[in-house]
Amino acid sequence: MSDVVIVGGGPVGAAAALALARAGHGVTVLEARPTATADDRRTLAIAYGSQQILAGLGAWPAESTPITDIHVSQRGHFGQTVLTAAEAGVPALGYVLRYNALVQAQARAMEDQPAISLVTGATVDAVTPGEDGAEVVWRQQGDTLRRRTPLAVLADGGRALTAATFGTPVERPYTQVALVGQVHTDRPHDGRAYERFTPTGPVALLPYERHYALVWTGTQEAVEALIALPEAEFLRRLQDWFGDRAGEFLRVTARSWFPLTLKVVREVARPHVLCIGNAAQTMHPVAGQGFNLGLRDAAALGTVARGRLPGTLGDAAMLADYLARRRRDRQVGIGITHALVSGFSNDWPLLPLLRGQALTAMNLWPWSRRALARLMMYGMASS
Ligand SMILES: Cc1cc2nc3c(=O)[nH]c(=O)nc-3n(C[C@H](O)[C@H](O)[C@H](O)COP(=O)(O)OP(=O)(O)OC[C@H]3O[C@@H](n4cnc5c(N)ncnc54)[C@H](O)[C@@H]3O)c2cc1C
């Protein structure tokens, strides 16, 4: 029973597999998808610190677009600021890439790593914690298979299996959903991302290839109506909502939407079982932190597993070490994201004024911009 078993070969499960293999352990990844490639339209903003982790794991995709600065503003009120890579002393604050490109780069890196066995078409039905190891049960090509392991890592993205293993997570559905799409403008983006807070939710434009990846949040009803609009009318509404700081919007493609919710598993460890990534915390994409937090979970797992004998994997000491390293980063990442959504998505009396003052103060104090950029790039991690 020496291999660690990871449930889910998404970006976090794959990163955990690579980190554990580098720490000297055998890993089996069970992934429900029939192939190693994913079919997912979302683009991810990956913080500079996360890019460093992925490059270190040999899983950084060839194609990505650097973010050299981030313009932050609020609709209809004063106050704005700009975070820049130059001021933060890094080549880029982050990078934008496709979820699919990342999953493919990770699959290639796993293939090159003899310690990892990636099994696709394997749907895990149960993970049972136990004092001397965990049991994992899965379905594959009509057969039911089971394996005991010293450590089962749940990286299923926060689906039913997480709830069955760790209990119902604390859940707060947002009244917003996220419209995603790609928009083309009449000006080059020059690596600039935009985060604009509006009373109905944030709008983000991320530089991606020669256009922008759009994330526009609003109520489900409003977003569905926007998706149904003819292109010209959609662009007119976006221009009106966002303003002209990115230029004139000329074209939009691939409009779709995702539900948004905050889901947090309070106790992420059971005897010989851990949950990481979206399984542990599913967050609003407002600050683009969901995957970055999950990736730091994976990196910390590799750190605490390094130098451990297989017999001590997943024991109480290792899990306690993992929890101690991850507690603060998780709390801060979840807390800040939730505060941004609740504090910036409404026009309650005085709030726009306070937000405007905060943005103006940041604009005046370079140290505050550097501190925010650091937090976004590296979190509070100590792995
Ligand atoms: C619109 C949108 C925009 C986003 N933008 C950003 C961003 O800019 N930056 C950022 O950091 N984050 C962003 N996120 C969040 C980010 O997508 C997630 O944090 C990230 O995908 C989590 O990775 P994961 O591997 O934990 O889970 P997932 O990506 O959900 O992967 C889980 C994997 O587990 C597999 N699986 C599920 N159940 C089973 C089972 N029973 N057996 C076997 N396999 C199973 C699935 O097939 C999947 O491959 C965004 C999210 C949304 C919705």
Image (cartoon, rainbow, N blue to C red):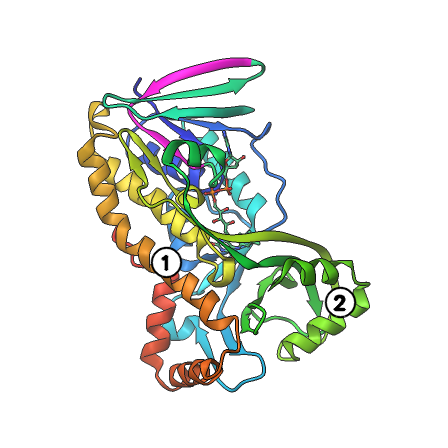
Most foreground residue, 138 or 82: 138
Which label is found at residue 333? 1
Residue with the mark numbered 2: 234
Give the secondary structure at mark 1: helix
Q: Which residue is drawn at 43% across and 70% down?
A: 85
Taking the magenta stretch, the answer to whether it contains residue 154 is: yes
Quadrant position of the N terminus in the picture: top left
Q: Which residue is drawn at 46% across and 61% down?
A: 94
Farthest-out residue, top: 143
Left or right: residue 234 compared with residue 129? right
Over which residues does the magenta segment extend? 143-155
Q: Is residue 347 above or below residue 209?
A: below
Answer with mark 1 or mark 2, whichever residue precedes in sequence. Answer: 2
Q: What residue type is labelled 1?
A: Gly
**Image location of residue 222, percent across then percent down:** 68, 63
Q: Residues within 10 Å of mark 1 (few under 14, many from 20)?
A: many
Taking the magenta stretch, the answer to whether it contains residue 343 is: no
Left or right: residue 20 compared with residue 98? left
Q: Which residue is drawn at 52% across and 19% down?
A: 139
Farthest-out residue, left: 317
